Image (cartoon, rainbow, N blue to C red):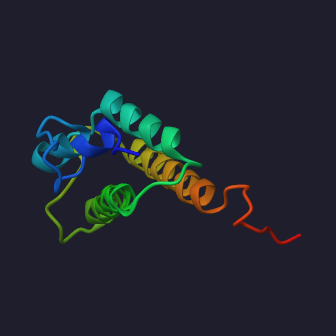
Amino acid sequence: MSLHPVIAENTARFAQWRDDSFMGTLHESHHWNHAKFGALEDAILQLAGNKHDDTTIAALFQIFDYLMLLFGCHFDPSDDFKFKNLTIEQICDYRERVQVAFSAYFYRTTNRNDSSTTTAG
């Protein structure tokens, strides 16, 4: 399965990286683009429940890891990073959406209902 184009353009180590992607804009200008985040969130949820190669998993983890870092940086008084266009309430809401989307991906992907997966009852 090939890497989802929205995931690829938001992952700095791929040739498809775009400076105007959600992650690119966030990194360069500290601006949270609501529409581009929605597209990224949708892409993550579309991938949930399917097997993926290590490249896709690594890309998703890189995005998740960097977003969690930025949420922490925003609230660290000694860090210069601040989200420029979000209220505290919006930051908390988006942090939860990030956690839910990535949790859905990793939970559904690793707990598919197939012969290689068993569930505790």
* Residue 42 position in % (x across, y down): 46, 35
* Residue 113 position in % (x across, y down): 73, 55
Residue at 55% over, 47% down: 48
- Which one is in front, 81 or 44? 44
- Which one is in front, 27 or 111? 111
How many labels sit on residues? 0
- Which one is in front, 31 or 12? 12
Q: Quadrant of the C terminus?
A: bottom right
Residue at 37% over, 38% down: 40
Describe residue 28's horizontal placement relative to residue 73 as left or right. left
- Which one is in front, 15 or 94? 15
Determine which quarter of the picture holds residue 9.
top left
In the image, residue 36 sits, relative to residue 58, either above or below, namely: above
View extreme (top): residue? 35
View extreme (right): residue? 121
Residue at 48% over, 45% down: 93
* Residue 117 position in % (x across, y down): 71, 66
Describe residue 75's horizontal placement relative to residue 14 as left or right. right
* Residue 12 position in % (x across, y down): 17, 53
